[in-house]
Amino acid sequence: MRSLFMAMVSLCLASSISIASAQDLDITEIMAAKAAYDESQTDARRDALLLALANYQGDPAVETVNAHLIVMTQDALSGSYERVRESASAASRHLEPVKDIVPRQYIDASLLAAVALFNTERDGDAMIEMAHVEGFAAYHRDSTGERPDWATKFRWKAEAWNMAMDAFFETERRRHPAEEDLSAIVASYRPDDYEPTPAASENDEEVLPLCEGRIVQSPKLKYPAQAAKDGLVGAVIIRFDLDTDGKVANPKVLASVPNESFDDEILKTIVKWRYRAKNRKQVGVTCRVERTNIVMPFNFLFGS
């Protein structure tokens, strides 16, 4: 689990962040508890710092945000979902009022909290929390109006986690949020002036239509047993193109959960796939096999 959290947690909190000035805030207890925790990360000092943060009633400040993130990161490194659920949930709540100022840190905390909730309680509410993560990341834009790469990565990771959780609840026949409800949550983050990027037109009379056929997935994509140690479910979302011969080109792993350690194996597998037209004689004559931006999701269940 250490590698899972290391991949998701970032501590890129710049000192120039303008949240709230600590000069007029009563953070003496927090600073003392943090200094003690920095000196030695014992359970008692961790609990004391979390208590000081819980007692704080002021606006988020650089010092309070950093304190939350430091505890959350150390908990992630400990490999305990129970500890992460406590500290990540607290961090997410604290950062929520300033999520537009520290969006990456807010998403870090919110995603970790949702993952920890699922892995400790097997609670369908984790899917709702993850849908909020996906929605915020999907429609977040930086000061230039562009979606940063980190937001795109979080969007796909959140979607992969909800795929995996949905597969688990379906298999266990447990109640969980409906897909349309989750989609509504994601869509609620869409700005009023949002305009989707138009899809490339395939109706140009100079472009042949796609051939009827299928992608031959040989060899099969398998989730290695050692990569499943962090949970009972896994999910992978991949994107690739098909060249003029129907061979996979430009493969990319958009997200793999709960572990990213076998992404190279995924790429080595899917690059061997090929699109097989139903009528090969028609390829290049009346239809084509070349395609771009194909996104395919996969779920894996490991048994309890």
Image (spheres, rainbow, N blue to C red):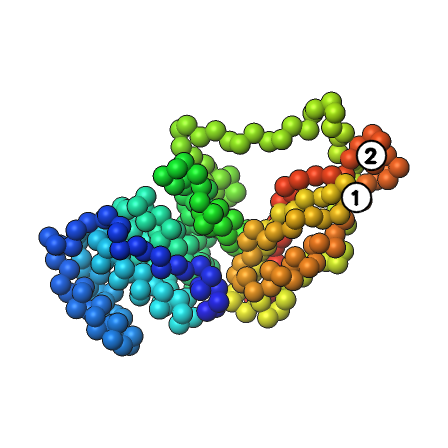
Which residue does the image show at 63% across and 66% down from the upper left?
224
Q: Dot 1 lies on which element?
A: loop
Query: Residue 274 versus residue 186: which sits nearer the camera?
Result: 274
| Kind of residue indicated by mark 2 | Gly
Which residue does the image show at 71% across and 54% down from the upper left?
271
Residue 117: image x %, image y %? 41, 59
Label 1 crowd bin: few (<14), some (14–19), many (20+), radius 10 Å: some
Mark identifier at residue 245:
1
Q: Is 229 on the left-hand or right-hand side of 266?
A: left
The C terminus lies in quadrant: bottom right
| Kind of residue indicated by mark 1 | Asp
Which residue does the image show at 18% across and 57% down from the upper left?
56
Label 2 crowd bin: few (<14), some (14–19), many (20+), radius 10 Å: some
In this picture, is 136 found above or below 55?
A: above
Instruction: State whether residue 119 appears in this view.
Output: no
Residue 238: image x %, image y %? 61, 50
Farthest residue, direction right = 281
Query: Residue 181 versus residue 162: which sits nearer the camera?
Result: 162
In this picture, is 160 found above or below 39?
A: above
Query: Residue 128 versus residue 55: which sits nearer the camera?
Result: 55
Mark identifier at residue 284:
2
| Corner quadrant of residue 143 | top left
Q: Dot 2 lies on which element?
A: loop
